[in-house]
Amino acid sequence: MGGPRLLSPVAAAAVAAAAAIAAVAAEPGDALHCPITIVGGGMGGAYTAWRLAVDAKVVRPADICLFEANARLGGRIFSVGNVPGYEGFVTDMGAYRFHRTNHPLIRSLVEDRLKMETGCYTDATTTLPMDTPDCPSAKTLSATTRTRSYLGNLTTQTGYKLDEWTPDVPYFLTDEEKWGAGQARKTRRTVASVLFGNDSLIPEMASRWDALHDNRLTVEAAMALADETIAALRAGTYKGVPYAEVSGVQIARDAGISPEEMALDTALGYTSWFQGNVLGALIVAAREAATARLPLPPTGPAAAMVVPVTSNGAGRKRAGMVTIVDKMVGEARAAGVRVFMGHRAVGVRRVSACDASTYETGTAPLLVSFANGVGVATGRLFLNMDQPGLIALGAGSEPMASAGTDFKRRVDGAGVLGVSKTYCFWPRAWWLADLGLTRGSGRFETPAVANTRYHDGPVQCADPADLATCRGGLLVDYSGSDPTGAASGLYAASYADAPSSPRSDAEPYTLLLANSTVPRHRLALAAIVDGLRTSHTPVLDGLGLTPDVIPDPDVCLVASWYDIGVHMHRPVPRLSPAVVSEELFVKPVVDLPIHLVNEAWGGISGWSESSLLSAERALGVHLKVPAPAWLDRRVYDALITNFNKGA
Ligand SMILES: Cc1cc2nc3c(=O)[nH]c(=O)nc-3n(C[C@H](O)[C@H](O)[C@H](O)COP(=O)(O)OP(=O)(O)OC[C@H]3O[C@@H](n4cnc5c(N)ncnc54)[C@H](O)[C@@H]3O)c2cc1C
């Protein structure tokens, strides 16, 4: 890794404490016995340890060992607290917020059980909407296709879409494909428009859409309807092929949506997501329609995205998403769970008779070996690993060695979509002070700047009433889902210091300092500034400002989650179509106590909620751990007991 390692103060404290334990507990060559072993200290691994030892208290904490490969906890949650010159502005390079009604597990965990404070997902000053009782949704500021920007009205335009067709669209569209006044179509077609809504081409969804979204439904009725919809979707087929084996792109192409229309959607939205099987996307839509009705506390942010915050009296500040992981691991450690940092598991195998002389195996059926020579015999193993991590263990390692072909096929079908985030910091928050952009997204077609979020970045103002006194960071680019990198700001991530993968210890993170002498860093910085100035030309022109109102930043942070981003499950043919993937993932081998707990295996692509779902399924269904007292029972029954199958 090229740049200095930066850790949030909170994470650093947790790591230091954990390392102290690790130093006495496991030296290279040590043979340990852990009745329960958790490999990975991400959201899923941390939750598993905490639930067993602290929340449900069903396992003696000292019987649990948590091993993390890196020197920090959090995995794809990576909160940086000491950006040079901007210490104390916590910046999340990976996951950073959750949705209060779409993600009932994490909401209940954070707010009801851990009692952590959350605030609106927007800037952290008192004048910006951070501390309003309601979270205003982000509005699209402008959409750009190729070099043309289309400015929207911040108060009326929503979503990532071009509302009207214009001759500036860079793709050749037939009259049938155009939309807008006087044109052939009234609305633009996207893959999403084919799958969702009461015009969906999926009859099971179209016929229930309005009922699912009828605001008069009670929670019970909505959950029952979601269950019934999901059961119908599981049984449904597209031209005779189960929905799990068909992609959204396939259906959209059959419907006559041209590659050019989809290319436009790739530039503006998320076509790549629809390379995944449609069943997963449809189930999530049905379930979210129901969970949207769950009652929320009468005070606090509304049913929208929130971030963990700390209160300092004058104005709330982002606390960093890793504080959730830190809190759970901190409580688990305090209770006696053994935490080992810098331990990368490299193999899992069945215990043999010869192991008895080396390991205190007892009846432990599994042996986990680590890259530093440590080995652990264990009675139960939770692998908090994503798809590349699981595959890196190898075909000779459990669970792959003993798992059936159907499981392996579904693991292979778990594609990884690259994601990158770039935050830059300025002494003057020009987007607020000079351009008046407090929230909304800009979608651009400039090399390193494809998607700017004005409502996203740690900002502090000396005088909250005067935006000219604000300094801090802006999410200048948040890109993903485009495997080519051509239509997105993954370009900036191309300048990452090192690829991050299960084979390396490199962090997916590069620090670009204004005075850097590293040629790659200078190129990246230049591309970012050029991209910002070019993409804002229409805004600057409208205000009569020149490009230098956007100065060079002091520092930028680029996170390149290129090789381990988020997961998208492709439509691979299933050898046992009736078996739900999540059931296979949660216990891949019938006679081995191994459980996969990770976003990759929980059914909701790209959200921490998925990590918690997979972990809670392993705990509740396979270990018979009682349902969390803090979780709505209806949610538990549908998502955990019934594995989202439809009850
Ligand atoms: C850019 C980006 C933005 C995102 N934004 C959001 C968001 O706003 N909200 C949200 O909810 N989700 C978001 N997500 C998704 C979210 O980050 C993940 O769903 C979640 O963090 C995954 O947690 P996990 O525990 O399942 O896996 P991971 O975070 O992948 O944790 C796995 C852990 O296991 C460790 N590990 C792996 N292999 C080994 C080994 N062999 N030995 C020992 N340890 C090992 C890893 O180091 C890691 O710590 C985002 C993801 C990205 C990439």
Image (cartoon, rainbow, N blue to C red):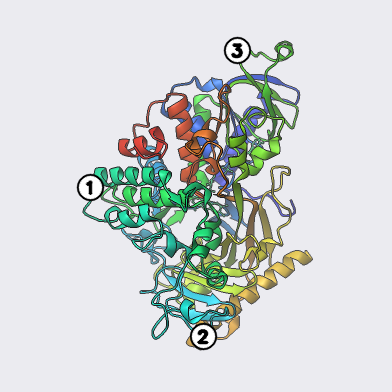
Q: Is residue 167 left or right of residue 531?
A: left
Q: Earlier in the sequence, mark 3 or mark 2?
A: 2
Q: Where is residue 507 in the image (x, y as percent from the top left)?
A: 67, 49
Q: Residue at x 73, y 42 (%)?
A: 503
Three-letter amino acid code of the residue under disc 3: Thr
| Residue neighbourhood size for the residue with mark 1, other residues' Cα within 10 Å, grouped as few (<14), some (14–19), many (≥20) | few
Q: Is residue 215 left or right of residue 415?
A: left
Mark linked to residue 362: none
Which residue does the numbered mark 3 point to in the structure image? Answer: 363
Q: Where is residue 123 in the image (x, y as percent from the top left)?
A: 45, 62
Q: Which of marks 3 and 1 is nearer the N terminus?
A: 1
Q: Where is residue 614 in the image (x, y as percent from the top left)?
A: 49, 37
Which of discs 3 and 1 lies nearer the camera? The answer is: 1
Residue 403 visible in the picture: yes
Callout 3 secondary element: loop
Q: How many angstroms separate mark 3 from mark 1 (CA)?
A: 49 Å
Q: Position of residue 567 (x, y in %)?
A: 57, 49
Three-letter amino acid code of the residue under disc 2: Pro
Q: How many angstroms separate mark 1 from mark 2 (CA)?
A: 46 Å
| Residue neighbourhood size for the residue with mark 3, other residues' Cα within 10 Å, grouped as few (<14), some (14–19), many (≥20) | few
Q: Does label 2 point to a residue whose CB lies under 8 Å from ligand 1?
A: no
Q: Mark 2 and mark 1 in contact (Cβ < 8 Å)?
A: no
Which of the pair 16/96 is nearer the observer? 96
